[in-house]
């Protein structure tokens, strides 16, 4: 009788995969963010109060905390912020590029345009408006900050990530809408060191695109054919926000 309700009943037979990490007061965040920036679930109104018997908590966190979405204003002065994106901007065809074998032999592996083209040879062209995510196996290192950073004995950071040519391919050739990864940053540590900057992240955001960092469970989603949904609190003026992300799979 009601088509959307029928569609919902049909959708409940699909498989839903959580793609975001759980957060608590011990969850890691970038060392440049001052200590004390995270305070989750602080009780500000406790049980047994005469006005109303209930529990209320407050939450304090950086925008770039845990699995999160970045908006252009994070790296671009006067760039678009959170309020400029609506629900229809946050549902994507999901493409997952698996480079785990290459990362096993090179923890700083930089994903190339050829890697993306190899993916397309197997699964077809990346559709317009897609979220293209890198599966590197890095999510297994959560929540150890040193492991996520690939911190070596000499203090250097070592982790895989995107190259500028790969990002230009998905955005300028294939018109993707967003990119995602399991690591803390878009750029591989090699690319970041070479540029002296997070040049890949800067490129993505300067193009007015979105990115989702610190994804997980990408190994539980097919490389092509799934749909990703990204949600976040409807807060105005944010350069980034913790995100709840899930994939809908056949």
Image (spheres, rainbow, N blue to C red):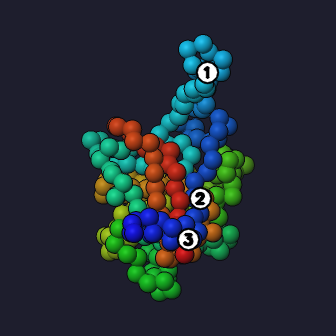
Res. 158 in view: yes
Residue furthest to the front? 1
- Cβ atoms under marks 2 and 3 closer than 8 Å: no
* CA–CA distance in space, label 2 to label 3: 13 Å
Quick one: label 1 or label 3, which is nearer the N terminus?
3
Q: Which disc is residue 14 wearing?
A: 3
| Nearest to the observer: residue 188 or residue 247 | 247
Decide: is 130 above or below 87: below
Q: Secondary structure at mark 3?
A: loop
State the residue at coordinates (61%, 21%). 53
Q: Quadrant of residue 210?
A: bottom left
Q: Which mark is residue 53?
A: 1
Q: Residue furthest top?
A: 50
In this view, the residue in front, 239 or 197, is 239
163 with respect to 54 (left or right): left
- The disc, 1 or 2, on the residue closer to the chain's N-terminal end is 2
Q: Is residue 20 above or below residue 123?
A: above
Residue under circle 2? 18
Q: Secondary structure at mark 2?
A: strand
Disc 2 crowd, CA 10 A, few/some/many (<14, 14-19, 20+): some
Q: Which callout, 1 or 3, points to the residue nearer the camera?
A: 1
Give the position of the N terminus as an image quadrant: bottom left
Q: Secondary structure at mark 1?
A: loop
Few, some or many residues within 10 Å of mark 3 (<14, 14–19, 20+): few
x and y, in percent, of residue 193 in the image = 51, 54
């Amino acid at each position: 009788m009601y088509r959307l309700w029928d569609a919902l009943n049909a959708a409940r037979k699909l498989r839903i995969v959580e793609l975001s990490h759980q957060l608590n007061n011990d969850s890691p965040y970038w060392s440049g963010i001052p200590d004390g920036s995270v305070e989750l679930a602080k009780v500000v109104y406790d049980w047994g109060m005469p006005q109303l018997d209930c529990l209320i908590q407050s939450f304090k966190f950086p925008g770039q905390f845990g699995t999160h979405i970045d908006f252009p204003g994070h790296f671009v002065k006067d760039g678009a912020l959170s309020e400029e994106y609506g629900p229809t901007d946050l549902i994507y065809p999901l493409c997952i590029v698996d480079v785990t074998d290459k990362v096993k032999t090179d923890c700083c592996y930089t994903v190339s345009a050829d890697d993306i083209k190899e993916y397309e040879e197997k699964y077809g062209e990346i559709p317009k408006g897609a979220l293209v995510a890198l599966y590197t196996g890095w999510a297994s290192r959560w929540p150890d900050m040193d492991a996520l950073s690939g911190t070596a004995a000499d203090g250097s950071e070592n982790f895989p990530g995107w190259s500028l040519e790969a990002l230009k391919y998905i955005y300028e050739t294939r018109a993707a809408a967003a990119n995602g990864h399991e690591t803390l940053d878009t750029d591989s540590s090699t690319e970041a060191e070479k540029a002296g900057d997070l040049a890949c992240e800067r490129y993505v955001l300067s193009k007015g695109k979105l990115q989702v960092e610190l994804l997980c469970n990408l190994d539980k989603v097919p490389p092509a054919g799934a749909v990703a949904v990204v949600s976040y609190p409807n807060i105005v003026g944010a350069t980034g926000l913790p995100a709840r992300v899930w994939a809908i799979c056949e």
